[in-house]
Image: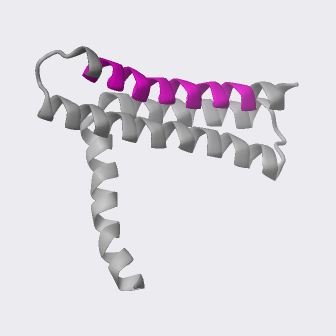
Amino acid sequence: MIKRYAKRFPHALRGIVHATRTDFSFRTQVYLGLAVLATAVYLFRPLTETELLFLVLAWFLILITELQNSALEAALDRMHPELHQEIGHSKDLAAGSVLIAGLFLIIVITTIWW
């Protein structure tokens, strides 16, 4: 069972590398998140382990939702290249999940600041 899951790891890693190389939105979230984390660690030092964990968790949530958003958009563009209202709504919903993840990061930073 473990071998079966271990064989899937290279596929997942390849997806992350591909997104980092080719997807502007994901790459932006990676670099912007690193900048926000570094700034927060500097401004709010010393951070407790829990505060740092929440910051990293919030950033990872943004990265996860951005990967899902990009994957959904790529699949929908391939399956239905012409404009369609329902496809647009699906893409908007996926983009909304990234926005909500970003709001969670803002809530975490605000809570640490207070």
Q: Whole-percent x and y of residue 101? A: 57, 32
Quarter of the image for residue 104 reads top right
What's the magenta region? 87-108
**Farthest residue, direction front:** 86
Q: How is the image coloured?
A: one colour
Residue shown at 52%/24% (left/top)? Answer: 99
Residue drawn where x is 63% and y is 24% of the image: 103
Is 102 a magenta residue? yes
Q: Main secondary structure of the magenta part?
A: helix
Residue 52 magenta-highlighted: no
Taking depth in this image into account, of 91 and 43 the one nearest to the observer is 91
Q: Nearer the viewer, residue 49 or 39?
A: 49
Q: Please identify the residue farthest to the right as the structure is shown.
A: 114
Examine the image and state in which quarter residue 94 appears.
top left
Q: x, y percentage for residue 109?
A: 74, 29
Residue 5 against residue 33 in the figure, above or below: below
- Where's the C terminus, which quadrant? top right
Q: In the image shown, does 68 or 20 lie closer to the viewer?
A: 68
Q: Position of residue 23 (x, y in %)?
A: 29, 34
Indicate the quadrant containing the N terminus: top left, top right, bottom left or bottom right. bottom left
Looking at the image, residue 37 sits to the left or right of residue 34; the answer is right
Does 100 sit above or below residue 52? above
Q: How many marks?
A: 0
Position in image of residue 112 (x %, y %): 82, 32
Q: Quadrant of residue 41?
A: top right
Q: Residue at x 32, y 35 (%)?
A: 70
Identify the residue shown where x is 49% and y is 29%.
Answer: 98
Q: Is residue 3 left or right of residue 42?
A: left
Residue placed most toward the observer, 82 or 25: 82
